[in-house]
Amino acid sequence: MTMIEDQIDSVRQRIQSTCKACGRPADAVTLLAVSKTFGPEAVQAAHRAGQSAFGENYIQEAVEKITTLRHLPLQWHCIGPIQSNKTRLVAEHFDWVHTIDRLKIAQRLSEQRPPELPPLQVCIQVNVDGGATKSGIAPADVPGLAREVANLPRLRLRGLMCIPEPAPDFEAACAVFTRARGLFDTLNAEGMALDTLSMGMSADLEAAIASGSTMVRVGSAIFGGRHYPTAV
Ligand SMILES: *Cc1c(COP(=O)(O)O)cnc(C)c1O
């Protein structure tokens, strides 16, 4: 077993024991392996451990990896900010986008999604803790954007995503994640049929799962520490 395969196993165990502890089914939470800054060999090692969904932040780096690994049945999620001049690359290469926070970007992705590909699966990024430096839209603006995104022909709105600041303890982390969960439940009560709540990373996946996360995005607990920017 390589280190990566080992780490994948222990992250899966963390997910399973947390699901069990909070009375959720073991398959309620999907693991997204965040491979940013790591090369194709790291992704292949994770794939050997049965991992098929990968998250990437930097579009150019991701497109190279996606192209190199085209022969493998992998699913690619864009979890980084997207500028207008990168929407075409994203629409052509990714399966999912978690970081929709402007209608303009969503419209471009829909227009540029190649017709031979299935709709792009998307989440709206919500700034749940009001972090000033962060992307994501204010909770109050989510319902309006969700309705518009749901009407775009080549996108399929799956849910919400958030990246809160690290919290001082488990309860504080849960309090923030629970706000995203509340918004998710409200949209569903209004008939949106969302199934994805993308929240939780290496350090806080237990709190996220306890608060209703359906997809955790885990990088360093699988691949180790990241080195910017030369390790790309
Ligand atoms: C890098 C990143 C992650 C993974 O973070 P780790 O702490 O390494 O697990 C998850 N989500 C987003 C949006 C990221 O940018």
Image (spheres, helix red, strand yellow):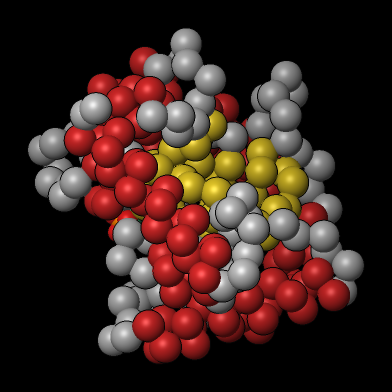
| For residue 113, above or below residue 227 | above
Residue displayed at 73% across by 19% down: 116
| For residue 33, above or below residue 80 | above
| For residue 161, above or below residue 118 | below
Q: The C terminus is located in which quarter? A: top left
Q: Position of residue 229 (x, y in %)?
A: 14, 43
Q: From this viewpoint, is residue 137 visible? A: no
Judge left or right: residue 26 versus residue 46.
Answer: right
Q: Position of residue 194 (x, y in %)?
A: 75, 60
Quarter of the rendering containing residue 81 = bottom left
Residue displayed at 74% across by 75% down: 185
Please give the count of numbered marks on the rendered protein: 0
Residue displayed at 38% across by 29% down: 49
Between residue 194 and residue 91, name the one nearer to us. Answer: 194
| For residue 135, above or below residue 75 | below
Q: From this viewpoint, is residue 13 visible? A: yes
Residue displayed at 72% across by 44% down: 155
Q: Ligand 1: give its quadrant.
A: bottom left
Q: Residue furthest right?
A: 191
Q: The N terminus is located in which quarter? A: top left
Between residue 225 and residue 109, name the one nearer to us. Answer: 225
Q: Position of residue 60 (x, y in %)?
A: 35, 33
Q: Residue furthest top?
A: 71
Q: Position of residue 94 (x, y in %)?
A: 54, 33
